[in-house]
Image (spheres, helix red, strand yellow):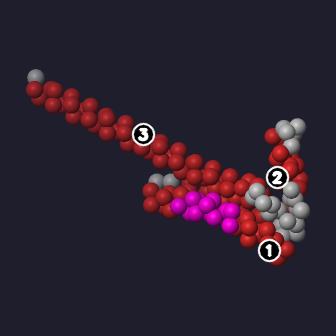
Amino acid sequence: MLNLSALFESEQWSLHEHAQAFVAAINWKHEPWIWAIFCCHLLLLLVTLLFRSSLVIQGGILVIITLAVSLLERINRWCAGHWQSFATQDYFDQSGWFLTIVVAVPLMLIGVLILFRAIYDASSLLIQVKKMQFTQEQKEKQKKE
């Protein structure tokens, strides 16, 4: 069994060494379901980028991300009991490190990207409104003179 908890509790390793050990512990050639998860992340990122101007789609993606991350503990428990049916080794420890790294972190990065885009759009809109307000005030000031 892959014990990620023990791997991450080792204080003598650097972050780079932890990452190398994590990558080395996974049987990449015989785990197509991991590649499917990565493909889903790429598809979600592509949809996020293609529809970056649609607030409805961006909001829907954020809801999907929130639901997926909030259900991750239950998914980890189910996978821990049924890993033999889809994996070559047990990646699903009690702490859920594997699914956190493979599923939650990429989803949260996509969510942060959406939030940064929303903040950028809001600040751009605020600048436009302030420019129009300033222009309107200048016109009103010229009319009075």
Amino acid type at image mark 1:
His
Amino acid type at image mark 3:
Ser
Q: Quadrant of the C terminus?
A: top left
Q: Residues within 10 Å of mark 1 (few under 14, many from 20)?
A: few
Q: Quadrant of the N terminus?
A: bottom right
Which residue is outermost to the front?
94
Residue hosting label 2: 5
Q: Quadrant of residue 55?
A: bottom left
Residue drawn at (58%, 48%), measured in percent from left and top?
112
Which residue is outermost to the bottom?
85
User: Which secondary structure, mark 1?
Assistant: helix
The label shown at residue 123 is 3
Mark 3 → mark 1, Cα distance in angstroms:
47 Å
Q: Residues within 10 Å of mark 2 (few under 14, many from 20)?
A: some
Which region shows up in magenta?
63-74
Q: Nearer the viewer, residue 87 or 131?
A: 87
Q: Seen in the image, is 13 located left or right of residue 35?
A: right
Which residue is outermost to the top?
145
Residue hosting label 1: 82
Mark 3 → mark 2, Cα distance in angstroms:
41 Å
Residue drawn at (73%, 65%), measured in percent from left and top?
76
Residue 142 in the image, given as x and y percentages of width and height? 15, 26
